[in-house]
Image (cartoon, rainbow, N blue to C red):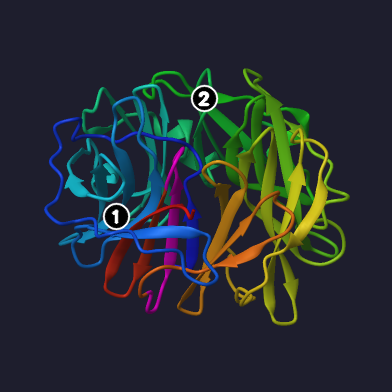
Amino acid sequence: MPVMLLVAATAAAGCTGGGDEPAAPGSPTAAAPARAGSTISWTDCRFPSAPGALVRAVAAGGDGAPWTAVGQESGATGVRPAVWTSLDGCAWRRVAVTPLTPDGERTGFTAVARRGRLVVAQGRSYSQVHGNIRPTLWRSTGGAPLREVELPREVFGGERGITVDAVVATPDAVLATGAYIGPDTFVAAHVWRTTDGADWTRLPPGPDQSGTATDQLLPRDMAAGRAGTLIVGTAFGIRGGSGFDGAAWYAPTGARQWQRADLSASGLAGDGDQRLVSDAAVGSGYVAVGTVLTGAGFQLRSTVSPDGMTWSAGGPLAGTPLPAGGRPTADVAPLPGRGAIAGTATGGHAQLWVSPDGRSWTAEEVPGPADRAAAVVLGPGPDRLVLVVQTATGPQAHVGRPAG
């Protein structure tokens, strides 16, 4: 899998193991004081996993439900879905899931969100005949195990499906976004909606969500703020001077179509190769992280918006650039209390940054050994962060709280 960092920015709940989950003996260690270059105090945590396990997303518990980590493990027949839960974000245990189809049995989870006591997870499997991606959707209520939802393949996939990339909870529904070929035969930034996790509706894309014969739209991430929902991604020119530009769409809560945002002042559109790869609701506005291709590789930069529609350039996240080949990946999330945290993993090393405003960034020390780090998963809660560093020996978990 590509080197990546994933951030679960939505508060989400677990699937099983409610209030009677026992704490793992001796799992959390004493919190270490903040070190030089660190504004967060970290506690090492227990994370049981089989060899080859991957954690792809973490979401905070709440409303009596535990924290949830989702991902995959390796089985005798290939990939199988994996879920872990924790009451406090530190003492984790592996819990069961209920697949209903062969695709579900081979699913690797990629995202999770919670709305009240409803938990929705998204995953993907691959056709053993053609190798194409097959999205899978899962739901849980009241702390029951995540159960695969049987949907007609054409709802998310089929001949028109391309990707499903993000799931987020809003005040009135759970939304998913991805690339899908619209009625006009052009690739569009589509949105799917559910209120119960079982019945999904693909919303007709608005004019601003649809590409053209020369402009292919590829959504990557979604964030729900106080007033509305933001999607970020890339517009790819496929003819005559092909290239990448950042793209973003915004809709007020309850709306069924998204408007294209103005990124002319974001520093992530225009000549060159620049892409928006992650976003988060921070305070009353939004912050997004993008990549700009330089001679040394992809450099990370931020952009900020008070309303999801008008954007201004933020600043660089100085560190080792991401490799120029492949799909650059980075993520951003709100910090407990105030500000934002972002990061990535490249060249076997994890990198984190913090910012009070989404514009100026300071490097944050990554706790514990992270030899050959391939991914960093960061799940923010109201008063703590859960950090899972993916290493050559498996996932390593930490809980962080603001120092001082």
Of 67 and 75, nearer the camera is 67
Residue topped by disc 1: 72
Q: Is residue 289 left or right of residue 351?
A: right
Residue at the (48%, 55%) spot, across then down? 403
User: Where residue 46 sits in the image (x, y, percent)?
Assistant: 22, 58
| Magenta-colored segment: predominant secondary structure | loop
Q: Is residue 272 left or right of residue 287?
A: right
Residue topped by disc 2: 193
Q: Amino acid at mark 2?
A: Arg
User: Where residue 264 sits in the image (x, y, percent)?
Assistant: 88, 49
Q: Is residue 328 left or right of residue 77?
A: right
Residue 73 belongs to magenta span: no
User: Where residue 14 sits in the image (x, y, percent)?
Assistant: 29, 36
Residue at the (18%, 62%) spot, across then down? 50
User: How many marks are shown on the rendered structure?
Assistant: 2
User: Where residue 184 sits in the image (x, y, percent)?
Assistant: 71, 34
Specify which label sits upstream in the sequence, 1 or 2: 1
Question: What is the number of the mark on residue 39?
Answer: none
Residue stretch in magenta: 370-384
Q: Amino acid at mark 1?
A: Gln
Q: CA distance from mark 1 to mark 2?
A: 25 Å
Of 314 and 276, nearer the camera is 314
Residue at the (42%, 46%) spot, across then down? 384
Q: Tell me the element at label 1.
A: strand
